[in-house]
Amino acid sequence: MTTKNFTPVLGLTDDAPLTLPKVQAVVRDDATLDVTVIVPARNEERRLPECLRTLLAQDEEQFRLGRDWELLLVDDGSTDETLKLMRAAARDGVTVLQAPALDTKSFTGKSAACWYAAEKAKGRYLVFTDADTLHEPRDLMHALYEAKKHEVAMLSYSPKQIVTGLAQRVLMPLVFSELASVYKLKDVNDPEKKTAAANGQFLMVERDTYFMVGGHKAVGRNVLEDVELAWNVKTSGRGLRFRYAPDAVSTRMYEGFSDMSEGWTKNLALLFPHALSLAMWRTLDMLLWLLPLVIVFYPLVQWQMVAILLVWARTIMRFYGRVRRSNFPWLDVAISPLGLPLFVVLLLRSWAGHKFFRVVSWKGREYRA
């Protein structure tokens, strides 16, 4: 799959013009701080404490909470102890917000919470980060410097992925290797290319650009709001930078198998618009991995055995050449062929859910696909 002149979510063709979507342009000029960090959270009582610990550790003399930056925590209708944990963390520079009742005609939950907080933010740069992220020391300062150095209005990091359990270890490298193939960083970061991508787990955007392109309100109904927002910024001509950043942030996306299955069922068909054909190609990979069994169970002449082994060796080289782009540890990459059946099933579930059922679910809510 190639990303040349291709924007997966928007489905542009080679000759489609790069034009800014029609949104209401609103420029805010009341910023008084360098950075506002916004953490939307829904039922994140297990992961939020560590996220807050690493964010509050950013507070130091050179980058003082309440003086240079602020932290907005947004409860998105949680039914667990998330809001209580947020209130316990409240102090000077930390604001706890409760997102209003969700208007499902205009927003998904996360986009609504982000927009609600952004309208109250005081920072010249807005950083949207998820409750399942862990931040390295000074990553906010470094991100601010990086955005200014590269003269971009949006900087997004793809975090280091923390995985547990066999299912996650074999599946996640497959997904992220395909993402690396579709959303090539050199194309995303090239203003002339029609490819935009971002990761909502860490997304820094210049305040005036955010409001100029309509922010999360303009992409409120999109399940992949981060990619759509990146597209809006890129087509505004303000500059977009996206990179893998284990030096800045890490995340454990999923607690267990069920939420991993639900999450990728929601997203795969949107991330990979040719999900059905991709499922077929990965099924072919499974069959090719089993080629040596032909030699075991069928009598073959020597040249046939050599041909089969050459095809098998080529399959292995091509497979690992692709999966190593995932940035996962070598052992996870090595055992990733075991995840092919699960990857195919999730691709098909996501494709069917979006194409036929038109409904996806996440954290107890259903959204129109």
Image (tube, rainbow, N blue to C red):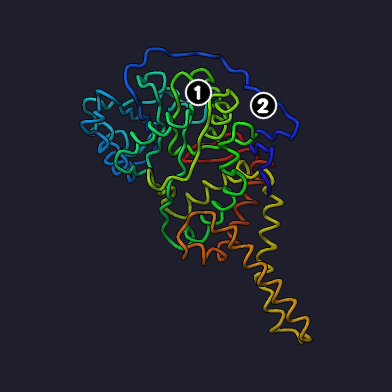
Residue on which the image places disc 2 = 18
**Quadrant assignment, res 60:** top left
State which quarter of the image contains the C terminus: top right
Instruction: Determine whether 315 is above or below 76 in the image.
Output: below
Number of marks present in the image shown: 2
**Front position among marks 2 and 1:** 2
* Mark 2 or mark 1: whose residue is earlier in sequence: 2
- Which SS class for mark 1? helix
- Which SS class for mark 2? loop
Three-letter amino acid code at the position of disc 2: Leu
Percent of width and height locating residue 305: 74, 81
Q: Residue at x 32, y 16 (%)?
A: 32
Between 173 and 3, the residue placed more toward the observer is 3
Percent of width and height locating residue 112: 47, 26
Instruction: Determine whether 352 is above or below 295 in the image.
Output: above
Between 88 and 359, the residue placed more toward the observer is 88
Kindly identify which numbered label has been placed on residue 346. none
- Tags 2 and 1 touching, CB below 8 Å: no
Between 295 and 154, the residue placed more toward the observer is 154
Percent of width and height locating residue 242: 50, 38
Q: Residues within 10 Å of mark 1 (few under 14, many from 20)?
A: many
**Quadrant assignment, res 96:** top left
Residue on which the image places disc 1 = 215
Q: Residue at x 54, y 63 (%)?
A: 336
Q: Residue at x 64, y 32 (%)?
A: 192
Residue at the front extreme? Answer: 149
Three-letter amino acid code at the position of disc 1: Gly
Q: Is residue 343 left or right of residue 11?
A: left
Q: Residues within 10 Å of mark 2 (few under 14, many from 20)?
A: some
> Between marks 2 and 1, how big is the CA–CA gap?
19 Å
